[in-house]
């Protein structure tokens, strides 16, 4: 039995929200989108704190790597802005890509940062020096999303050409191209144990892939429209999906059954437009949408 309670709705963005990230500091959330800045929110008081810094283009990705006092923001113009929390200011941006940045993830063991772009490449940066180390040509078109395996031996890249490409993080060589989706892959997430990879696509399907054999284990007809994001609960056997169909769904991560649908059709005061990203903060689920709002949900499992 899962019960859902809407605990807060944070307003203030004047345009669609595409990115959210929890800070390294507990109780702090960052959001960005089609606005003119990155916004900081208090999850303890459920209120606006400040606009962190201005941006020259839409923000599609925000990443706060563990162990570093930095925030990275990927922009539509190809720049990656870097905010230093200690200096409380923007430092030298990462300039390499000429097309939009869609995802940013860090590999803690290697102290490297991965940046995915519409140009079909993933750039690899040193977290210590913020210098460009490598560029991986993954696809002829957009690399939309990145997921790092829990043991940090693999990275999976979701692409506009319908493939999910799995790479070896030791030498950045291609291990396997996973074919099955009929439209662009918008979200990838390794399961917390690393035994499978979940992919969500514009084709409205969620596919479950074995990380040992790379075979397709399950196909879930998850939504009516694009699956924008997949997020695993940090400790319990569930994952949530966010969709362009305005709904959020919670699934069993061991049995792949649907346990809860959160939408206006189901009686919840939920988002009125596409749900673009979601994040777990303990048993709270945070969602952002094209409707310009952030909603905090308390999810109770019994």
Image (cartoon, rainbow, N blue to C red):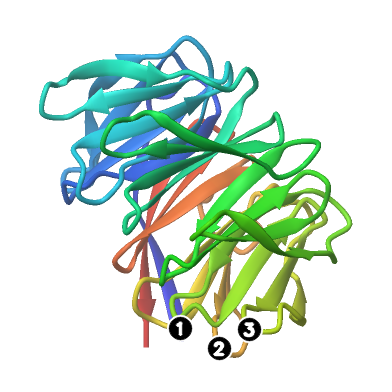
In front: 96, or 66? 96
Looking at the picture, how far across and down is residue 276, in whole percent?
58, 44
Task: Residue at 78%, 76% (x, y): give it.
Answer: 219
Q: Secondary structure at mark 1?
A: loop
Looking at the picture, how far across and down is residue 130, in whole percent?
33, 30
Instruction: Compare marks 3 and 2 and give the one earlier in the sequence.
Output: 3
* Numbered circles on residues, count: 3
The residue pinned by badge 1 equals: 237
The residue pinned by badge 3 equals: 212
Mark number displayed over residue 19: none
In front: 44, or 201? 201
Left or right, 254 with respect to 26, comes to right
- Which residue is situated farthest in the top direction here? 56
Q: Are marks 1 and 2 in contact (CB under 8 Å)?
A: yes
Left or right, 183 with respect to 197, comes to right
Instruction: Compare marks 1 and 2 and give the one earlier in the sequence.
Output: 1
Looking at the picture, how far across and down is residue 286, in whole percent?
40, 52
Q: Are marks 3 and 2 in contact (CB under 8 Å)?
A: no
Quote the CA–CA distance across marks 1 and 3: 20 Å
Quote the CA–CA distance across marks 1 and 2: 6 Å
Mark number displayed over residue 254: 2
- Which residue is situated farthest in the front direction here? 171
Q: Secondary structure at mark 2?
A: loop
Q: Is residue 125 above or below residue 82?
A: below
Looking at the picture, how far across and down is residue 216, in whole percent?
77, 79
In front: 270, or 208? 208
């Amino acid at each position: 039995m899962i019960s859902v309670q809407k605990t807060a709705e944070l307003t203030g963005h004047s345009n669609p929200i595409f990115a959210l990230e929890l800070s390294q500091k507990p109780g702090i959330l960052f959001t960005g989108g089609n606005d003119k800045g990155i916004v900081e929110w208090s999850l303890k008081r459920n209120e606006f704190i400040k606009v962190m810094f201005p941006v020259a283009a839409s923000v599609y990705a925000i990443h706060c790597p563990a162990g570093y006092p930095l925030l990275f923001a990927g922009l539509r113009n190809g720049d990656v802005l870097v905010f230093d929390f200690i200096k409380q200011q923007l430092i030298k941006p990462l300039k390499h890509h000429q097309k939009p940045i869609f995802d940013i993830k860090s590999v803690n063991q290697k102290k490297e940062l991965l940046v995915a772009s519409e140009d079909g490449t993933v750039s690899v940066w040193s977290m210590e020096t913020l210098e460009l180390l490598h560029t991986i040509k993954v696809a002829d078109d957009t690399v939309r999303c990145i997921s790092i395996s829990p043991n940090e031996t693999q990275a999976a890249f979701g692409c506009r050409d319908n493939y999910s490409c799995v790479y070896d993080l030791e030498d950045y060589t291609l291990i396997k191209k996973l074919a099955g989706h009929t439209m662009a892959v918008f979200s990838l997430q390794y399961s917390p144990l690393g035994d499978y990879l979940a992919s969500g696509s514009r084709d409205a399907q969620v596919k479950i892939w074995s990380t040992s054999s790379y075979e397709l284990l399950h196909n879930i007809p998850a939504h009516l429209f694009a699956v924008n994001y997949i997020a695993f609960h940090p400790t319990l056997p569930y994952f949530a999906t966010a969709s362009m169909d305005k709904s959020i769904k919670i699934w069993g991560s061991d049995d792949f059954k649907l346990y809860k649908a959160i939408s206006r059709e189901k009686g919840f005061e939920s988002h009125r437009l596409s749900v673009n990203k979601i994040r777990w903060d303990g048993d709270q689920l945070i969602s952002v949408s094209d409707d310009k709002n952030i909603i905090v949900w308390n999810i109770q499992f019994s």
